Image (cartoon, rainbow, N blue to C red):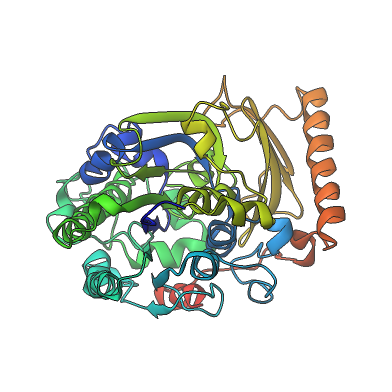
């Protein structure tokens, strides 16, 4: 074990797609401070959240287990994480004496932290704007950081940011940073029709948009503004880390539970659908005293890789070998010992639509287990090299590829059922076509865990 175990500061952002971070090539400067972390650390170009949405994603991040093992496949699962599956804070405390605090979400579903603190997550309607989510977070996260430093033990601070999760209502000047027009101007083309005409989400979306909204580019700009606002607030936390003399001894991890669809695939301003905007998320590791600076890893990594990676990073290789994890450490990729952690992997979603899929570097299969409310085909197949936007469904044109991917997906599922001794969790649910998100109040209740 190293002479001094590094502290772990983990930013886990809700609903952040990688391709809207400027360090991932976005055309707007949305994340200058996060960009600096990437420039001073390691950026993983192809990191994925394979199990959508929030609950399965965070469970995977915190356990290093896949959805077949932890069974938390839905936003509203049938119970908490099984007691025989340890979480990251439990492992760090048991093996190396780490103290831990989690900001956001209680311990009912994500147990193991020494302390939980909550904040106002900004579930506001348009008349109640702005939503100062990240500032509210800082009000509790800064004291939490200072408390951990005073404790004297190595520490884990896990921060769940709710920017840029809908509603996208950033405060000034971020609300006009990327959009200066009046989005209700009658001279603008009305591009909001598909949003107004989708009953399951229309009430929710329109409740946090100005009355008479015409320009669909406005909520996209507000999403980007919320991201820039959060980035600025993250800078406050990073500055305080420096002031406390902890920066050199702290590994900063920046990632997201899942991404967000904005105007793609008819899945407006939410995170359902197994398309790239929802599953491709950022991952940055930054500790300049121990890691290379400005390095980019192009291999595929997944959320279940984080726990074994962090345990190895803090010197607990023996604990990694003694436990069961479904992920693989990403550190061999940094050392050049292998190019990728995966060549193909399994996908699930189970909130508004119940689907699973199989992704390779070239192909993606999406297989619906019941009809979905977007009336999409029951089977979708995309060539990610020739069609990165996933706009041309090749399921009927490429039956051999389709059948090969289905066979590989089901072989993996059946193998994991045999290995875990547990049923396929996604088959324990039925969603139907009657689900609605309703009002802001209803959405808030869905997020309360």
Above or below residue 378? Residue 340 is: above
Left or right of residue 121, residue 268 in this image: right
- The percent coordinates of residue 32 (x first, y second) are 21, 42
- The percent coordinates of residue 42 (x first, y second) are 37, 36
Residue furthest out toward the front = 3
Nearer the observer, 232 or 348: 232
Left or right of residue 210, residue 14 in this image: right
- The percent coordinates of residue 409 (x first, y second) are 78, 40
The image quadrant that residue 203 belongs to is bottom left
Give me the residue at 60% from left, 48% from top.
50
Nearer the observer, 61 or 207: 61
The image quadrant that residue 378 belongs to is top right
Count of all numbered marks drawn on residues in the image: 0
The image quadrant that residue 404 belongs to is top right
Give me the residue at 76% from left, 62% from top.
425
Above or below residue 134? Residue 320 is: above
Left or right of residue 136, residue 375 in this image: right
- The percent coordinates of residue 74 (x first, y second) are 64, 65
Nearer the observer, 114 or 98: 98
Give me the residue at 50% from left, 78% from top.
107
- Residue 162, can we see it? yes
Above or below residue 33? Residue 44 is: above
- Residue 184, can we see it? no
């Amino acid at each position: 074990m190293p002479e001094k175990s590094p502290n772990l500061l983990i930013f886990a952002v809700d609903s952040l797609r990688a391709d809207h971070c400027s360090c991932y090539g976005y055309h707007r400067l949305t994340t200058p401070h996060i960009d600096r972390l990437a420039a001073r650390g390691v950026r993983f170009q192809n990191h994925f959240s394979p199990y959508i949405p929030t609950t399965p994603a965070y469970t995977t991040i915190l356990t290093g287990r896949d959805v077949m093992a932890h069974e938390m496949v839905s936003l509203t699962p049938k119970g908490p994480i099984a007691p025989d599956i340890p979480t990251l804070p439990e492992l760090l405390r048991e093996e190396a004496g780490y103290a831990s605090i989690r900001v956001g979400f209680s311990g009912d579903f994500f147990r193991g932290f020494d302390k939980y603190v909550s904040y106002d997550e900004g579930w506001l309607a348009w008349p109640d704007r702005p939503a100062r989510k990240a500032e509210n977070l800082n009000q509790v996260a800064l004291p939490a950081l200072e408390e951990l430093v005073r404790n004297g033990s190595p520490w884990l601070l896990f921060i769940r940011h709710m920017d840029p999760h809908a509603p996208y209502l950033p405060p000034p000047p971020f609300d006009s940073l990327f959009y200066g027009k009046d989005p209700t101007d009658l001279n603008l083309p009305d591009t909001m029709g598909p949003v107004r005409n989708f009953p399951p989400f229309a009430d929710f979306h329109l409740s946090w948009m100005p009355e008479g909204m015409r320009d669909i580019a406005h909520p996209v700009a507000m999403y980007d503004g919320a991201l820039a606002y959060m980035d600025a607030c993250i800078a406050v936390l990073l500055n305080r880390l420096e002031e406390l003399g902890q920066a050199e001894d702290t590994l900063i991890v920046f990632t997201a539970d899942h991404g967000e669809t904005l105007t793609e695939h008819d899945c407006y301003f939410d995170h359902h659908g197994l398309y790239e905007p929802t599953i491709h998320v950022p991952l940055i590791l930054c500790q300049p005293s121990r890691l290379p600076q400005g390095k980019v890893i192009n291999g595929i990594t997944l959320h279940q890789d984080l726990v074994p990676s962090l345990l190895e990073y803090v010197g607990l290789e023996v604990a990694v070998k003694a436990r069961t994890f479904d992920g693989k450490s990403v550190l061999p990729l940094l050392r050049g010992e292998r190019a990728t952690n995966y060549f193909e992997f399994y996908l699930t979603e189970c909130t508004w639509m119940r689907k699973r899929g199989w992704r390779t570097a070239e192909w993606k299969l999406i297989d619906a287990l019941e009809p979905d409310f977007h009336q999409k085909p029951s089977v979708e197949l995309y060539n990610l090299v020739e069609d990165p936007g996933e706009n041309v469904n090749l399921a009927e044109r490429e039956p051999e590829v389709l059948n090969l991917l289905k066979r590989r997906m089901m072989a993996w599922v059946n193998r994991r059922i045999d290995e875990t001794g547990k049923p396929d969790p996604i088959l324990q649910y039925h969603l139907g076509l009657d689900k609605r998100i309703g009002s802001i109040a209803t959405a808030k209740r869905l997020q309360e865990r």
